[in-house]
Amino acid sequence: MMRPMQSHELLREVFQECSPKQVAAGMGLSLSMIYKWSEPPDPAAGSGSTNPLDRIEALMRCTQDRRLVQWVCQHAGGFFILNPKSTHPHPEYLIPATNQVVQEFADLLAVVATAAGDNQITTKEAKQIRARWEKLKSATEQFVSCCEEGNFSGLEARKKPQGD
């Protein structure tokens, strides 16, 4: 398994595309602070500095609230999808898993059709559409991830919660 990239490594790569001087000016910080973010933390040597990426990770870990990550993703023009946990392969779950994705899509279409029936979408209806869309994206991502791993045990046919 590949080691995840460390935050200072990512920042070092980012600063090859966008100059640290430009970042410092844009954020109103010293150039030395920006450079410290791209150094590995070494408290004994006094190098490195807790960078914004590490702070976001620490905040997420402390609060256990994924809305923080979702907020960052939304501001970057995207969305956050939680990766499913993998367990032992059980291919017999493939058909129910496929049905789950199709059902989520059908549920989204039903919400869209109901909302658009009067040729306008209210704020409440837009929120309902967004909620169904997020469920569809999550279900589909989980399905695709399990397909890639050849592991469908996490997709065991689940009963949908009431009210969905």
Image (cartoon, rainbow, N blue to C red):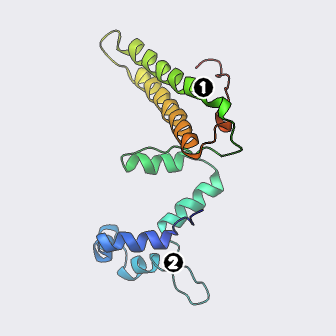
Q: Is residue 42 above or below residue 16?
A: below
Q: Secondary structure at mark 1?
A: helix
Q: Residue at x 44, y 43 (%)?
A: 79
Q: Amino acid at mark 1?
A: Ile
Q: Position of residue 116 (x, y in %)?
A: 35, 14
How many labels were placed on the picture? Answer: 2
Q: Is residue 130 above or below residue 103?
A: below
- Tell us which disc is closer to us: 2 or 1: 1
Q: Secondary structure at mark 2?
A: loop
Q: Earlier in the sequence, mark 2 or mark 1?
A: 2
Q: Position of residue 51 (x, y in %)?
A: 49, 70
Instruction: Classify mark 1: residues with Cα within 10 Å, few (<14), some (14-19) or many (20+).
Output: few
Of the pair 53 and 133, the residue shown nearer to us: 133
Apparent side of residue 100 relative to residue 118 in the rendered image (left or right) = right
Q: Which mark is residue 16?
A: none
Image quadrant assignment for residue 43? bottom right
Q: Amino acid at mark 2?
A: Ser
Q: Which mark is residue 95?
A: 1
Apparent side of residue 87 relative to residue 56 in the rendered image (left or right) = right
Q: Which mark is residue 49?
A: 2
Q: Position of residue 152 (x, y in %)?
A: 64, 37
Q: Is residue 24 above or below residue 86?
A: below
Which quarter of the rendered picture does the C terminus lie within?
A: top right
Q: Residue at x 60, y 47 (%)?
A: 65
Specify the farthest residue to the right.
88
Instruction: Classify mark 2: residues with Cα within 10 Å, few (<14), some (14-19) or many (20+).
Output: some
- Give the CA distance from mark 2 to mark 1: 50 Å
Q: Residue at x 41, y 45 (%)?
A: 74
Which quarter of the rendered picture does the N terminus lie within?
A: bottom right
Q: Position of residue 119 (x, y in %)?
A: 29, 12
Specify the farthest residue to the bottom.
45
Q: Residue at x 53, y 60 (%)?
A: 56
